Image (cartoon, rainbow, N blue to C red):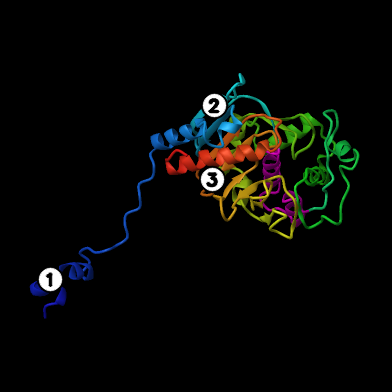
Amino acid sequence: MTHDCLRPGLAALFAAALLAGCGGGGDGPAPAPAAPSDAQRIAAATATAQSTSNACAAVAPFYWEIGDRNARLASASVAGAGSTRAYTASTVLAIASASKWLYAGYVAQRRGGALTDSDIQFLNFRSGYTNFDHCSALQTVDSCLADGSNGNYSAATDGYFFYNGGHMQKHASLIGLGGLDNAGLAAEVRSQIGSDIALSYFQPQPAGGGVSSADDYARFLRKLLGGQLRMAALLGSHPVCTNPSTCAQALSTPVPATFSWHYSIGHWVEDDPASGDGAFSSAGAFGFYPWIDASKTWYGVLAREALDAGAGADSAICGALIRKAWVSGAAL
């Protein structure tokens, strides 16, 4: 018996419907758009970074780069209006809170990827050690902790997200790093994340005393993308909400009140419901901004050193634009 789909009369009368029913055409899913080429990505990111009409104009001069697990794929130094300073991949900078991701990476490596409940509470800033101010260059981890109110515990903040260097300072002391000075702390952290990563400290504080370059920080990020460090499996894990205006479990955050991000193990998750793209990052107060995109395919660094209030958040906004331009292949 002949199947309806093969009857010539019906096929001629109802061609479109019969073709669809027989698998010969119809409204199937459209093919996925082709991914941008490397050349398109580079052009889009470069134009976005150099724009004089977006958020990047306000943070120039700076250096930026983007790459994957294997290598740097694009980079450039962007000049600033009225400034003679130029940043490159090898410019050594105070990276401030970008130090936090490195310390968390150290702890993850030292623990073999199995963090304790205590580790997690200290590394996503819910430990109650929220009175830290600063160290001096000649102190050790423990002598800094004992200075002033740095090591004071607050029961009122225990269990709540409170962005403060005291969490990591106390944690470092608890795991046996208390006697280390700047050089000793750098050597210890590098012993786990890699001696190929140049890192020093201007103060013996794991949360904010780091000194490095975009080139060296990028090595750390490539190791995360390549799964060479235990932190790779912890990206975005154990997230806590961070915006006091939208979250009862948050008390203090350095990011703008319009951002509702989460905080993971020593790094941010840029997952604001309205504007976030889910990237992982660790912006420093002076504007050093490293990131890994939500797909864990690309990394980036925006490197500069500024004393402006909000320099870290400003770099993050520019960096997110460059990242979006790279992923989409369209300049912003």
Residue type for callout 1: Ala
* Frontmost residue, 246 versus 185: 246
Question: First in sequence: mark 1 or mark 3?
Answer: 1
Closer to the observer: label 1 or label 3?
A: 1
Disc 1 marks which residue? 11
Residue type for callout 2: Val
Disc 3 marks which residue? 293
Disc 2 marks which residue? 78
Please give the name of the residue rendered at 12% of the width and 71% of the height, measured from the top-left corner: 11
Please give the name of the residue rendered at 82% of the width and 32% of the height, measured from the top-left corner: 181
Question: First in sequence: mark 2 or mark 1?
Answer: 1
Whether residue 129 appears in this view of the structure is: yes
Magenta segment's dominant SS is helix
Closer to the observer: label 2 or label 3?
A: 2
Residue type for callout 3: Asp
Instruction: Check disc 2: other Cα within 10 Å, few if <14, some if 14-19, many if 20+.
Output: many
Q: Is residue 110 magenta?
A: yes
- Alpha carbon of mark 2 to alpha carbon of mark 1: how far? 63 Å
In the image, taking residue 180 as reference, residue 310 lies left or right, namely left
Q: Is residue 272 magenta?
A: no
